[in-house]
Image (cartoon, grey):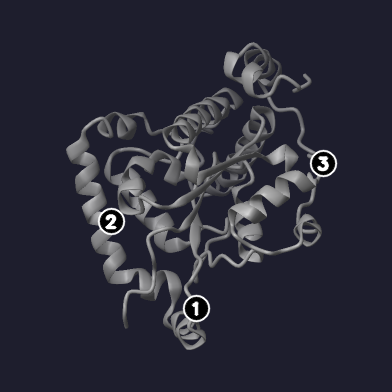
Amino acid sequence: MKKNYHNNPYIILGVHRSGTTLMSDIFSRLGIFMGKNQNINKEAKFFFQLNNKTLKENDSTAYDFDIFLEKLNDEQFINRLSDKFKNEIQKNINAKFFGFKQLLKYQFQNKKIKWGFKDPRTVLLYSVWKKIFPDAKYLIITRNPVDVSMSIYYFEQKRYLKKLKKRPDLEFGMPLTKAFDVWKKFTLSLLKIYEDNNTNFLMVKYEELKNTETLDKIIQFCNSNADSREINKIIKNKPSNYKIPEGYSQFINRVKNDELVQKLYPELNF
């Protein structure tokens, strides 16, 4: 079967728990194919596994990645990774990401596939992916640090409690301050990426997704003729029912005194 993917996928970038899963749903509604096999977070397993395996092989994780970022200062390291990824894509993207039934469907209809993927780890590997897909279009979604940090904290707490049954000596490793550090490092990376080349980028705030103007920008960015009122229906603003965790007051003091927070979210109330 001939090569059916083209060089400009739609890629969603954002920190964990910032709305990337919702954005993947929106992209799907706008006619962008987001992968045959997806995990619970709407991440295409093909690209998730490439990113995740690479971080592990370089002594890093989705939350602890300073070692990996340091290695990205070496252009040869980036080139080796991009060559490795290209080989994997050429060999397996048809079967593992698209699926042959999907490809046959598009060939029969004589249509070019609009496709994309999302995985927060892509932010960390952006310098690699931009070599592979230099004409990709990136949607960057940001979200305020309080909601992101609280969501990361409780998401990781659920995972911790499950592991605790088998490993009672395990310590919880995601205090609110660390979750905030993850938000800040990711957000700084996102701003740097946006400044790198904002012609193929759209940056939106999670808090503004219900606005018709924002939805229209996303629809136009995806070259879709969808109705923003229909997209609006899948965006649910659920109030958070989180209990106040240990260290919350210290966390809030740190957040509200942070210069990046003041710059991006001056309207944030504490």
Which amino acid lies under the numbered mark 2 shown in the image of this protein?
A: Phe
Pointer 2 or 3: first along the chain: 2
From this view, report whether residue 254 is shown above or below residue 111.
above
In the image, taking residue 177 as reference, residue 207 lies left or right, namely: right
Decide: few, some or many residues near mark 3? Use Cα within 10 Å; few <14, some 14-19, many ≥20. few
Quadrant of residue 227 in the image? Answer: bottom right
Q: Are marks 2 and 1 in contact (CB under 8 Å)?
A: no
Quadrant of residue 258 in the image? Answer: top right
Residue 210 seen from this side: no
Q: Residue at x 60, y 26 (%)?
A: 176
Give the numbered dot on residue 166.
none
Image coordinates of residue 14 in percent, x first then y, are 54, 41
The residue carrying mark 1 is 111
Instruction: Please identify the quadrant where the C terminus is shown.
Output: top right
The residue carrying mark 2 is 85
C-alpha separation, residue under disc 2 versus residue under disc 1: 26 Å
Residue 99 seen from this side: yes
Q: Residue at x 32, y 70 (%)?
A: 92
Decide: few, some or many residues near mark 2? Use Cα within 10 Å; few <14, some 14-19, many ≥20. some
Image coordinates of residue 259 in percent, x first then y, are 59, 13
C-alpha separation, residue under disc 3 versus residue under disc 1: 41 Å
Nearer the observer, 65 or 132: 132
Pointer 3 or 1: first along the chain: 1
